[in-house]
Image (cartoon, rainbow, N blue to C red):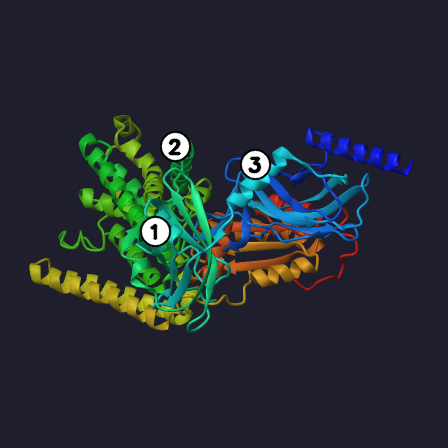
Amino acid sequence: MIKTMKRFLGVCAMAAGVLGASGGALAEPVRTGHTLAELISERAAVVPGDLFLGALRLDLDDGGWHVYWKNVGDSGLPPKIDWELPEGVSVGEFTWPAPHAIPLATLMNYGYEHQLVLPFEIRLPQGATPGAEIELKGRASWLICLETCIPEQADLVLRLPVAASLVAAEAPGALIAEALAAAPVALTGEAMVERTDDGFRVGVRDDAVAAAATSAASARFFPDGPEIIHAAAQTVEFGPEGLSVSMTASEYAPAGEAPLSGVVVLEGEDGSRRAWVVAATPAALPAGVSGTMLSPVAAGLTLLPLLSLLGAAFLGGLVLNLMPCVLPVLSIKAAGLVHTAHNPAEARLHGVAYTLGVLVCFAAVGAILVALRMAGEQAGLGFQLQYPPMVAVFALIMFAVGLNLLGVFEIGGSLMGVGGNLADRGGASGAFFTGLLAAFVGAPCVGPFMAPAVGVALSQPPLTVMGVFLVIGLGLAAPFLLLSFTPAIARLIPKPGAWMAVFRQALAFPMFLTAIWLLWVLGGQTGADGVIAAVAGATVFAFGVWLAGRIGSGISGRAVSAGVILLAVIGTAMSANMITAPAEAAQGVASSGGEVSSEPWSPERVKALQADGRVIFVDFTARWCATCQVNKKLAIETDEAKAAFAEYDVAFLVADWTNRDSVIAAALAEHQRAGVPLYLMYPASGGPPEVLPQMLTPGLIAAAVRTAAGPGASEGLTGKGDGL
């Protein structure tokens, strides 16, 4: 009877296993925001003491959503599971498939798209009873990112019947086997590392690696730790015995010779990948692992995303025409339209010249950003105004333009080309220089459409980056280019006459206001001494103009005046440079003024405030960002916003990017922004922040605060905190 019962139980357990293998639910998939998560097993039924493989399966939404490798790179969090296991059951660590490089603006992350299967070992106790059920519970958590990063989690369950003999689960087993095949394998050869002037050079001497390298389209070393700058380009060479990879060291690299571990991944033209685990020990690299360069292929956008990116870039350029930092310069072009509106041929010439000036400036900005990125630097839009000497010189240029518009330069026409006769008889060259000025002052103004376009572009190959910047320039130049090719515009403008002189002189005052704004920026960067140096340069410049009028319009007079003006520009730049802060200055004590008190932002401070359950508002700003200043006065420092901050005990942090700061640049890049403003609202419950629009209103801020605080959050807050 007992034997019959055991046999019956065994048959029942086997039937349960077969049912599970043929489609019975052994696991419970969970849909989170952008992921379908579940635990899977290569077994449909297990036996006592069994050792087998399970896995965490994450099916990610399409469109670029990704999760992270065990070393996330510059930012992110890897998936993990917090287990609740039955007595006697043990679970091993994840086996990680070879990661992919995921560029994000100036950052480089490591992870996966589409689907991730992470196998792990499961061992059952010998005392498991046939006919019983083993239940494995775990809370899985991961960070999934696209334009923003979202922490997701799921309570997962895997139930496995215990049978007299095991039963395989074919479909899950195939997924696990595929993940194991994608995991790095051990080297049969050896690996070594040597220090270089810039960082490390890792060599791999292995027959399989040498054979794969000869037909590889790209190769990359993924470190286990933070020793290298992840976003910096890697130089790969291969030889008859293997390959070598040269990398730039990060600030976390140990001094002197030290081991370096990670994974080397080779990818073929067809997308096939092979990976090896590398544990390199300090030693000189043999000649057989180098000699022939291997140029990694950068992953570019497909046609539709590329067209969408360029469309956003064009719209961003159009919007720049309405930004407060560009309007003063555009007034110069308005004067130019007055002169050319009744001469179609000249109008078209000026329109083309203006457009070329804009494109040249944006091309230069794009090329510099590409060069900085390839050198491993953190840089974004507005970098040109993070250098006080350039701010001082630019203020002097705007002062000179104002003098020109007032007619101070009109000394027999001799100095009409010195300092920029931009609105009168300067011709196409004046229109070209106006385009340069408009683009130069407009580039730091990151407005709607432009911010995400540039943020995405900086993660793409150099040609895409340059294309996006040129299209932004076309957007900025498009209105004036269209007007210059529209003869009907002449009918809307009065005929030239005496009124034009008054109109031209009136346009000088926006130039002087722009110069004052730049001096205010300079004062925030260097203090009063920098402003005094710039004003002294402007005084010498004005003296040169006056001297030219006294000497006369001859060749010698122009030479003397030009020399004095040139010395004024150089002297102003040198004076500002002598007193400027270091190239990468630490943030000072931040304050947005008014009754709203603030403190400097840092990632550590955000974590500390989140641990206290505070709502956090972060203002990524800069003195040279006119949009930031408008938002500060018209939205942040209003009574409605202040009241919301006080009611919900909001911690107000300011990330001041007026001077260079690689930590702020990295944070901007993490949110796919290449410049300021950026506004983040962290909820009191923890988790990622809400990214607010770049143009704020008091009501929008107050509503975001209430949402971040949660229902009933204002109760009992009186007297709590000292942030406001």
Q: Earlier in the sequence, mark 3 or mark 2?
A: 3
Q: Is residue 65 shown left or right of residue 462?
A: right
Question: Tag on residue 303?
Answer: 2
Marks 1 and 3: in contact by CB < 8 Å? no
Q: Is residue 152 shown left or right of residue 164?
A: left
* Label 2 CA crowd tier, 10 Å (few <14, some 14–19, many 20+): few
- Residue 512 in view here: no
Marks 1 and 2: in contact by CB < 8 Å? no
Residue 460 point in image, percent of width and height: 39, 44
Q: Earlier in the sequence, mark 3 or mark 1?
A: 3
Q: Quadrant of residue 594?
A: bottom right
**Nearest the eye: 100 or 695:** 100
Residue 609 point in image, percent of width and height: 65, 60
Label 2: which secondary element? helix
Question: Tag on residue 61?
Answer: 3
Q: How many marks?
A: 3
* Label 3 CA crowd tier, 10 Å (few <14, some 14–19, many 20+): some
Q: Nearer the viewer, mark 3 or mark 1?
A: 3
Residue at image location 35% in from the left, 65% down from the top: 198
Residue at image location 60% in from the left, 54% down from the top: 617
Q: Is residue 541 above or below residue 357?
A: below
Q: Amino acid at mark 1?
A: Val
Q: Nearer the viewer, mark 2 or mark 1?
A: 2
Q: Is residue 276 shown left or right of residue 436?
A: right
Residue at image location 79% in from the left, 56% down from the top: 716
**Nearest the eye: 348 or 615:** 615
Label 3: which secondary element? loop
Residue at image location 30% in from the left, 45% down from the top: 332
Residue linked to disc 1: 370
Q: Earlier in the sequence, mark 2 or mark 1?
A: 2
**Nearest the eye: 682 or 39:** 39
Q: Amino acid at mark 3?
A: Asp
